[in-house]
Amino acid sequence: MSGKNISIRFCGGCNPSIDRGKLAAAVKEFLTARGHNVVYNRLDADLVIFLSGCSANCAWRYGETDRPQIVVAGTAIDGFAVPKENLEQELINKILAQVAK
């Protein structure tokens, strides 16, 4: 479970309902501590995390890839609503499930 290249792809940030930078920083810290490489806005990684600040979901809408992916759109992860205070932990749980594959 080590050494994956993981990309965090951001939306433009025009109307965020979540702090995308804070969430991305927490995810990066978590992943790099476990030996993964985090890059930004690339679609050719082992896992792509689309990080949109609101439900318009522009990070995903304007980025197509057949790579494994997790989609954060405001307070939803992969289409399921998540309480804002649980967003970071739920995203980390999803990432762990993906990198274990």
Image (cartoon, rainbow, N blue to C red):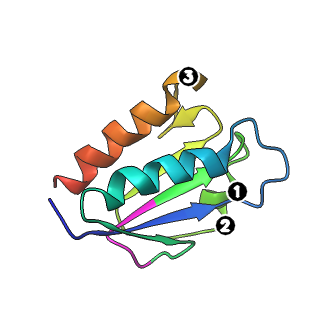
How packed mark 3 is, by other alpha carbons closer than 10 Å (few <14, some 14-19, many 20 or more), is few
Disc 3 marks which residue? Answer: 85
Mark 2, other Cα within 10 Å: few <14 / some 14–19 / many ≥20 = few
In the image, residue 84 lies at what x, y percent?
59, 25
Disc 2/disc 1 C-alpha distance (Å): 6 Å
Looking at the rendering, the stretch of residues picked out in magenta corresponds to 44-48
Classify residue 69 as left or right of residue 14: left
Q: Where's residue 73, x and y in %? A: 62, 42
| Closer to the camera in the image, 73 or 25 | 25
Q: Secondary structure at mark 2?
A: loop
Judging by the rendered image, the residue that carries numbered circle 2 is 62
* Circle 2 or circle 3, nearest the eye: 3
Was residue 96 drawn as part of the magenta stretch in this picture? no
Residue 18's x, y, as percent?
A: 69, 37
Check disc 3 and report its element: helix, strand or loop: helix
* Quarter occupied by residue 99: bottom left
Residue type at mark 2 is Tyr
Q: Secondary structure at mark 1?
A: helix
